[in-house]
Image (tube, rainbow, N blue to C red):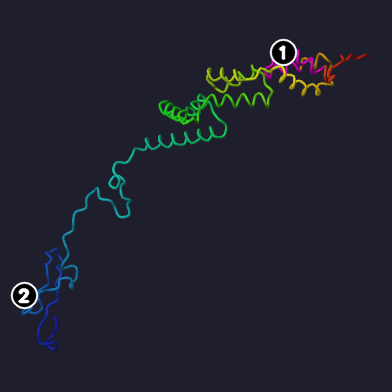
Amino acid sequence: MSDDAHGGEEKLAPVVPLFGGPVPSAPPPADPEQADGPSDENSWHTTWNAQPARPISADAPMVGDAPSSESSSGAEPSGDDSDDAELLRRAEARLTRSIASRGLSEREARDRLRRDGVDPHDVDEITERLSAAGALDDDVVAEQIVYQSVTRKNQGRRAVEQTLSKRGISREAIDRALESLPDDDYERALEFARGKASSLARLDRDTALRRLVGQLSRRGYGGSLAMSVAKQALDETGSGGTSRVRFR
């Protein structure tokens, strides 16, 4: 309250209820003549123009909470579905890298996917799609095996067939590969035997012959072919030409 020194009029300050009474919607006019005039409510303390508080829902997010993905982008896939999709993606990526680096038969591809925990239905879908794209082809893998077996390892027909079978090549692809295999087992076996005969020079004839025949057999040359080739190679190189007899 002000005294008469300030115009002789008494002005009342806004009153804030102390015990929870109703809050006036606007302050009382200071000048009766301005009671009906426009008032600037925003110039007063917020106590005068405070709005009633809205009730807070129990489901309302707290401050700092991340917005729910369901409200922003629809239904979210379950955790199991997401894990399955990631497993499938990684398994197919590993399979594709293996095919590019080494080449796999269709059976090898299926076995690898199963080891990675891929569902049988997805195994069929992936292998069929890769086969249609030409990434899986038993005939191509069989040709590679035949080339390596013949040119690098000097293997015979029987060894080549065993290698194809172990790699899971289909029976039809094996037959086609063996048909293309040159019928020169004797020449390839003799070439291999000549390369090994010199290392057997310190042995007697029987031991050298037995060892060389065994090496030829492991290369897929068996029976009379291995024996004939081993004898010819030892004769040509003079390896194991004499029997060693020791005298006391």
User: Magenta stretch mostly in which secondary structure?
Assistant: helix
Judge the density around disc 1: few (<14), some (14-19), many (≥20) Cα neighbours within 10 Å. Answer: some
Sequence-wise, the earlier of marks 1 and 2 is: 2
Measuring 18% from the left and 67% from the top, which residue is drawn there? 47
Task: Say which amino acid is labelled 2.
Answer: Asp
Residue 58 pos. (x, y %):
23, 48
Indicate whether residue 224 is drawn in magenta: yes
Q: How many marks?
A: 2
Q: Residue furthest right?
A: 248
Based on the displayed image, in which of its 4 quarters is residue 128 positioned? top left
Residue 212 pos. (x, y %):
76, 18
* Residue situated in front as seen by the camera: 189 or 76: 189
Q: Secondary structure at mark 2?
A: loop
Q: Nearer the viewer, mark 1 or mark 2?
A: 1
Based on the displayed image, in which of its 4 quarters is residue 79 positioned? top left
Q: Is residue 75 above or below residue 115?
A: below
Measuring 84% from the left and 16% from the top, which residue is drawn there? 204
Spatial CA distance of label 1 from label 2 is 127 Å
Label annotation for residue 225: 1
Q: Which residues are magenta?
A: 212-234
Indicate whether residue 210 is drawn in magenta: no
* Residue situated in front as seen by the camera: 180 or 215: 180
Task: Say which amino acid is labelled 1.
Answer: Leu
Measuring 87% from the left and 15% from the top, which residue is drawn there? 242
